[in-house]
Image (spheres, helix red, strand yellow):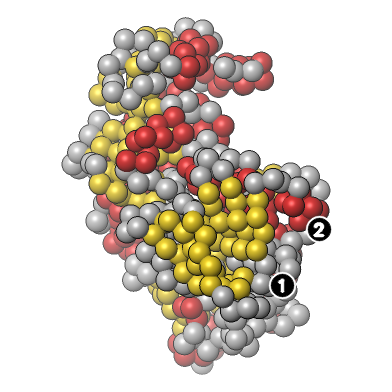
Amino acid sequence: MLDATMTQQLGTYLANLREPIELVASLGDDPKSAQTRELLEEIAALHDMVSASFDGDDARKPSFIIRRSSDASKWVRFAGLPMGHEFTSLVLALLWAGGHPPKVEDEVLEQIAELEGEHDFEMYFSLSCHNCPDVVQALTLMALYNPKITATLIEGGAFQDEVDERGVMAVPATFLNGEMFASGKMSVEEILAKLDSGANDRAAAKIADKAPFEVLVVGGGPAGAAASVYTARKGFSTGIAAERFGGQVLDTMGIENFISVPYTEGPKLARQLEAHVAEYDIDVMNLQKAVKLVPASQTGGYHTIELENGAELKARTLILSTGARWRNLGVPGEFEYRNRGVAYCPHCDGPLFKGKRVAVIGGGNSGVEAAIDLAGIVGHVTLVEFDTKLRADQVLQDKLRSMTNVDILVNAQTTEVTGDGERVDGLVYKDRESGEEHKVELEGVFVQIGLVPNTEWLKDSGIALSKFGEIEIDGHAATNLPGIFAAGDCTTVPYKQIVIAMGEGSKAALSAFDFLIRNANPEEIAQAA
C-alpha cells in the first residue's frame, strides 16, 4: 500500500511515539479489506510500539480504530482507506494516540477535555477533498482527548450505499448523534464553538481587554497576511481579525500561476501564510467576523470594528481585506438543494457523483477546469455558459472539447434547479437567442460563476463602494476615509488573483505606515488638549 517514500516518511514520524498504540481492524472479504490489512501490517512493522489486530466486529467493513494501549476509552475510527489528502490525517492520528503533543493551544485542549455530554460523530470525506482533512483532524483530536467523544471518519467512496441512504451529496459532511451537524469545512475551534455555548462569550471577553492597535487588518487571506507582515516589520502593533484565516485560498485546489512556485495547493499555501505571520508579533484573532465599522470621525479617536460576538476592536489605522466568496446563481431551487445536488467545489464533491450526470454553470477558467476534472469522474458533464462563447483560456477550452462525455451550451441562461424534494433531478435553461426553455435531466449542479465581495457589513460605514459592492481605493490602496485602507478581492482593483492580492496588501501596509508616521496618536492629541 505504501510506496518507498511514504514508508520512509511514516517511519520517521513514528519515531516520535511516546506510548504504545493499537490498531484494531474490522474486515470483510472484499479487496478494500485486503488493502486495509496490508496497510495496517505495514504500519505495525515500522515501529515496535505499534500493534495491529484483525478481530474487530464493527459493522462497517473495512474499518479500524486507533487507540492508546494504556487507555482504550479514547479512540478514533477510520472506515475505508485514509489515503490521498487524508494520509496526513492518518499520520497525525497515530502520533496523537501515541502521546505526541498536537500543535494546538493548551486552552483548546482544555476546552476539549472539559466538554460535557456524549458526542458520537460520524463524518464523511472523499479522498480528493482538500477541505476534509481539517474536519477529520479536528474530530480525531477531540476523540483522542475526551473519552465522551467518539469519531468515525468514513471514506464515502467505500460506502456508497450508506452515502446514498443518508443523502450525503457534499463533503465534508458531519453527523452528531445520528443527526446532521454541519456541512463544510470546520476547524476544531469552530466545532467547539458550536458545542460549547460559553465559547463566544469567553472569546468576546478576551478581545475586550485588548489595547488599541496601530494597525488592525480585517481579513486573513493573502492580502491580509501580507499587510500584517509588512506593518509588523515596521514595528507597529498589528492585529488580524479574520473570520477564517486563509480565506478563499482554503477552497482553492491547484495553484499554478503563483510566480516562482510552479504548483501548490490552497490549504498548503494557507498554512505557509499562517506560519509566516507567526514569525512576527502579530495578534491573530481567528473565527472573528466583523459586522460593523465605526470610523474615527464618529468616535473622536480610534476606528472601531464591532464583531459578531459583541466585542469591539480599536485601531489607529485599518486595512480591510475581507476577500470574496462564490457567487450564487440566484435561481429557484439553488438554495433548496444546496448540498443535496447543488455544489460549489468539484474537487470535494465530485467523487460523490461518480458515474452520474452533472452540470457545470460557468464558462470561465473555474467552470471549464471544473468540467474537465468532473469529466474524469462522472458519467456526463453539461457545461452551461450565459455568454455567447466560453471565456476560459484557450488551452482549457481545447482540453474540454477533446473530452467525449461533455456537452457545451453557450448563450444559455440557467433559470431553475429542479428536484424531487430530496435531491436534484435536473436544471432548466433558456436559449437566449430563441427564448425557448429546455430541461436537462441530471443529478448534480456545480456553480462556478465568479465572486461577490464580502463587504455588505460596510454599507452604512461611510466607506465608498462601487456598484458591484467593491471597496473603492486609489493607487495607494486608500479608501475615501482617512486612515482606512483596503486590499485584495474585496476592492476595485481588477484581476482577482492571489499574487495581486499579496501585492495590494503590501501596498496598503506601506500606505498605513506612511499615514501613521505623519499623524499623531489620538491619545497624544488628547493629552496635548
Looking at the rendered structure, the kind of residue marked 1 is: Thr
The N terminus - image quarter: top right
- Residue at (78%, 45%) from the top-left corner? 262
Check disc 2 and report its element: helix, strand or loop: helix
Bin the neighbour count of mark 1 within 10 Å (Cα to Cα): few under 14, some 14-19, many 20 and up: few
Q: CA distance from mark 1 to mark 2?
A: 15 Å
Say if residue 57 shows up in the picture.
yes
Residue labelled with disc 1:
388
Please tell me whether mark 1 or mark 2 is closer to you in this view. Answer: 1
Residue labelled with disc 2:
394
Q: Quadrant of residue 62?
A: top left
Looking at the rendered structure, the kind of residue marked 2 is: Gln
Between residue 258 and residue 292, name the one nearer to us: 258
In this view, the residue farthest toward the bottom is 529
Q: Is residue 287 left or right of residue 2?
A: left
- Residue at (74%, 52%) from the top-left corner? 401
Q: Is residue 205 left or right of residue 241?
A: left
Is 473 drawn above or below residue 448 in the view shown? below
- Residue 138 position within the rendered picture, expressed as x and y whole percent measured from the top left: 41, 40
Between residue 273 and residue 359, name the one nearer to us: 359
- Residue at (42%, 48%) from the top-left corner? 169
- Residue 4 position within the rendered picture, expressed as x and y whole percent measured from the top left: 66, 16
Between residue 520 and residue 444, name the one nearer to us: 444
- Please say if the residues under marks 1 and 2 sit with CB atoms less than 8 Å apart: no
N-terminal-most mark, 1 or 2: 1
